[in-house]
Image: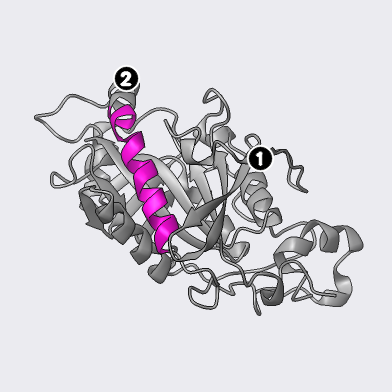
Amino acid sequence: MVHPASPAARQRLVLGVIGGSGLYKMPALAGGTAVEIDTPFGKPSGAFTCAKLPRAGKPELEIVFVARHGAGHRLLPAEVNYRANVHGLKQLGVTHMLSVTAVGSLRKKIVPGHLVFPDQFIDRTRSRASTFFGEGIVGHVQFGQPTTPAFRDLARDAAEEAGATVHDGGTLVVIDGPAFSTKAESLLYREWGASIIGMTTLPEAKLAREAEMAYAALALATDYDCWHEAEEEVSAASVMQIVAKNVELAQRAILELVAALPASTEDLPYPRACDHAVITDPSTISDAARQRLDLIVGHYL
């Protein structure tokens, strides 16, 4: 019997999209099916929309969408059940995850309205569950490159095809929120060399790695945080104005990515991050722990 998390069961590429502020649904998926899911880590942010999109000269591509903050934007960044969202995507067969997120710009050249595809993260969150491991199973995955380079490159190229002004690479600082940064913090992050600041891509990227999904972040710059002397300090209203103008652009970028992706994971591999990651003696792992993490490491245990 083929384990659902094994490479043999994940040969078909399935794209998962987590929608951020302003991106709560995709018109292209209007004919899709809403799927409610339970996970060993609780309830996700809402129903997942599953659809198959036609592609010229290629097999149709399966795509799964979930709104990170729930219907009506009800969840704070720190209230999102990131583990349930990622686990739900894995249950639905997702192999490659694109995270859409609103961010503040820490660099003058990254103008509000531009898109950024970061390749590094700095974690300034404090109280979020950031791993599937624990409670009887100890595992450590590599995270030196938190995004998947080949997948991120395709997503970046797709955004350029969609007509966006794109910045390739850069470091994203992730904070808890919901308050925006102090000016001192904003200036500190600039000194660290960070390019953008947001509230949601961690622990998503860490969980995607443990779930053995390729990961990339499409970051929409909405403001200059509070460091820029010539610009007004960031506000929720100003953020949503920029987001509203660029949601359509983000959706076009996603559809360009859909058109560009290969049909097989052999042509665009996902990371086998949990191979040799578990250091707990298998004989000591309880049945409950095995069941809870079956979709994460069951194919290795």
Query: From the viewer's perspective, is residue 163 above or below residue 158?
Result: above
Label 1: how many Cα within 10 Å (few below 14, some 14–19, many 20+): some
Camera-side residue of 239 and 180: 239
Residue 196 seen in render? yes
Rendered image quadrant of residue 117: bottom left
Residue that appears at 11% across and 31% down: 229
Residue tagged by mark 1? 33
Q: From the viewer's perspective, is 84 left or right of 253?
A: right
Query: From the viewer's perspective, is residue 274 above or below residue 180?
Result: below
Camera-side residue of 187 and 19: 19
Residue tagged by mark 2? 237
Q: Which residues are magenta?
A: 242-260
How is the rendered protein coloured?
Answer: one colour
Let me know if residue 244 is in the magenta part: yes
Q: Which mark is residue 83?
A: none
Rendered image quadrant of residue 181: top left
Determine the CA span between mark 2 and mark 1: 32 Å
Q: Position of residue 47 (x, y in %)?
A: 66, 36
Dot 2 lies on which element? helix
Q: Amino acid at mark 2?
A: Ala
Q: Amino acid at mark 1?
A: Thr
- Quadrant assignment for the N terminus: bottom right
